[in-house]
Image (cartoon, grey):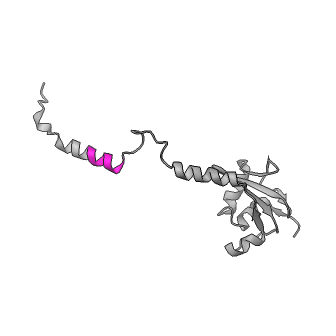
Amino acid sequence: MEEVRIDKWLWAVRIFKTRTIAAEACKKGRVMIGDVPVKPSRNIRAGEIIQVRKSPVTYAFRVLALADKRMGAKMVPQFMENVTPPDQYELLELNKISGFVDRQRGTGRPTKKERRDLDQFAGSIDLDEFDWDE
């Protein structure tokens, strides 16, 4: 086997869960070879470096061998080498640490504490006190 479709290879080495998702990523320009987006039908060879953008990180993989059938996770290192730069993993860590820090207070759903406070406040109002006829 000299060449194999990139969407098949990405699925076979378990970068994407399904071949359809791999093909979609190619169509959306998230899979690149040499900073050039590739189509799902593009054939790859051993030795090429494939970049896959999964927000916020751009992973890079070197093709060691070709495969067109899905394999067990233990076999994957024989077919690809992860050559992602360390700064991309730092980006991932920063994203994990920040979590919901960027969420402005008052936006989105109330927290558990805020919900309890609202329920307590709403329960303390006696609607019979108001004169609704005026």
Q: Residue 68 placed where, x, y %?
A: 78, 69
**Residue ranking furthest to the top:** 134
Name the main secondary structure of what is drawn in magenta. Answer: helix
- Residue at (46% x, 42% y) in the render: 103
- Is 85 included in the stretch rendered in magenta? no
Does the image show residue 131? yes
Q: Residue 12 placed where, x, y %?
A: 73, 67
106 or 26: which is nearer to us? 106
Q: Residue 56 placed where, x, y %?
A: 63, 49
Locate the N terminus and report the quarter of the image it occupies: bottom right
126 left or right of 68 in image: left
Range of residues picked out in magenta: 111-117
Q: Residue 34 placed where, x, y %?
A: 82, 50
Locate the C terminus and report the quarter of the image it occupies: top left
Q: Quadrant of residue 51?
A: bottom right
Q: Quadrant of residue 44?
A: bottom right
89 or 129: which is nearer to us? 89
111 left or right of 119 in image: right
- Is 116 included in the stretch rendered in magenta? yes
- Residue at (44% x, 39% y) in the render: 104
100 left or right of 7 in image: left
Q: How many marks?
A: 0
- Asked if 3 appears above or below 110 in the picture, the reply is below
Does the image show residue 53? no
105 or 16: which is nearer to us? 105
